[in-house]
Image (cartoon, grey):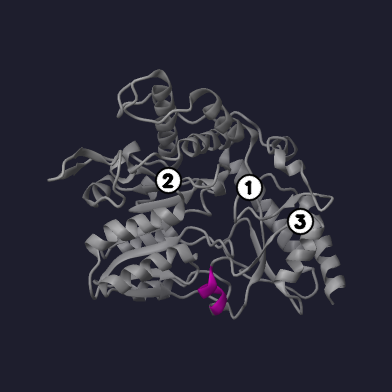
Amino acid sequence: MSLLTPVIQQPAKAVRKFNVDEVRKDFPILFEKVNGQPLVYLDNGATSQKPQSVIDSIENYYSHTNSNVHRGAHALSDQATELFENARTKVQHFIHAKYREEIIWTRGTTEAINLVAQTWGRKNISQNDEIIVSTLEHHSNIVPWQLLCEETGAKLQVINIHPNGELDFEHFKTLVNKNTKLIAIGHISNALGVINPIEKVIAFAKKFDCKVLIDGAQAAPHLNIDVTALDCDFYALSGHKMFSPTGIGILYGKQELLNAMPPWHGGGEMIEKVSFEKTTFNKLPYKFEAGTPNIEGSIALGAAIDYLSQFNRDDLTRYEEELIEYATEKAQHFEGLKIIGSDCNKTSVLSFVIDGLHSQDVGMILDQQGIAVRTGHHCAMPLMQALGLNGTIRASFSFYNTKQEVDLLFSGLEKARMFLS
């Protein structure tokens, strides 16, 4: 089998009608007990649970196909390479990239952003240039650009937000100028669930010929992603937030940009020829994939895409919208509870505070009842500072959650208030 011409498999077609009770049977961990109580898992913004088919794909790889990929002279290596490269093609179709070579395997969104900062950024950013991020960003889409600015003398500009948590697009437009080289912005806020108007951001950026990187970690599990239609320059996502293992993700980049970027990590696979006098580098995508990759993680991400592709994604999205609407209505009738990020375009996250109660204390009481939420600043400290908060309680939903679980969350919050007041 040729390295560059693996057998191409399209993702599974949508053939399965969505039914939450049936879907829950696909996720074995949902039937675990925590502190003697049935697990109510509402921490999907941090990591999602995995369907049995994804778990089986990892076991199958190690039981039947375990071998290093590429250049192998034996059957197992050929089989592993085919599975590995098929997974890349599945990602290509999943995000609607033009070319499979535009899909770079990374450890996740964080590494993907750092890759761009340390390759494209070092080559293209210099003193007096400007990089724009938003107040809503996860730390992983702030710190790499801060480091690059410190190294190059460039300036980091920050888009304000409205009181309801939405991006201030008018303020954004005042920041973009001839010195702007890159806009790095999240598709969905991990802390609030706010969906940013990235289509408008990208269209405006094109007027100034600046590049746009989208942090899609929170969007990939919930929305249809079409990088070609968006016309973004880079898009990053993490597998573990979309039902596959930790330690795997992708960077999408436009082919012409990736070709012009220097390598980041040096080692095996990313080279074409090595001598002590000169090294020449491999073609895309392997130029950015030094060393033995996370083979089983890539295969499992492909299996997660197959799992999602069984369904009409619009059905999943509508169901998640119903869940967040139901949870929001319950929250609005809960005395002393304030939703952070309300009356805005959002998905799958209910972030809130309760008068007189510390978020961490509430989280601990919920955990005693088997209810998993996230508390604190959610790796978005600048956002919390802008909102005047130390942190929030965040319940984040997926399509395997139920309205009954929402009810359990609010009965758990009532118990927490009684205990802590």
Q: Nearer the viewer, residue 220 or 28?
A: 28
Query: Given this view, does label 1 or label 3 mark the residue nearer the observer?
Result: 3
Q: In the image, residue 238 lies at what x, y percent?
A: 49, 49
Crowd tier of the residue under label 2, counting other residues whose Cα lies within 10 Å: few below 14, some 14–19, many 20 or above: some
Mark 3 vs 2, N-terminal side: 2
Residue 285 visible? The answer is: no
Relative side of 89 to 193, left or right: left
Secondary structure under the numbered disc 1 in the rendered image: helix
Q: Which residue appears at 35% of the width and 76% of the height?
A: 174
Residue 18, image quadrant: top right
Q: Which residue appears at 47% of the width and 54% of the height?
A: 216
Mark 1 vs 3, N-terminal side: 1
Secondary structure under the numbered disc 2 in the rendered image: loop
Marks 1 and 2 sit apart, C-alpha to C-alpha, by 19 Å
Q: In the image, residue 322 lies at what x, y percent?
A: 69, 52
- So how many labels did they put on this image? 3
Magenta span: helix, strand or loop, mainly?
helix
Q: Is residue 260 above or below residue 73?
A: below
Secondary structure under the numbered disc 3 in the rendered image: strand
Relative side of 138 to 396, left or right: left
Residue 371: mark in rendering: 3
Q: Which residue appears at 56% of the width and 31% of the height?
A: 57
Q: Is residue 177 above or below residue 103?
A: below
Mark 1 vs 2, N-terminal side: 2
Tag 2 residue: 226
Tag 1 residue: 318
Task: Check disc 3 and give the amino acid type.
Answer: Ile
Question: Over which residues does the magenta segment extend?
Answer: 380-385
Q: Quadrant of the N terminus?
A: top left
Marks 1 and 3 sit apart, C-alpha to C-alpha, by 24 Å
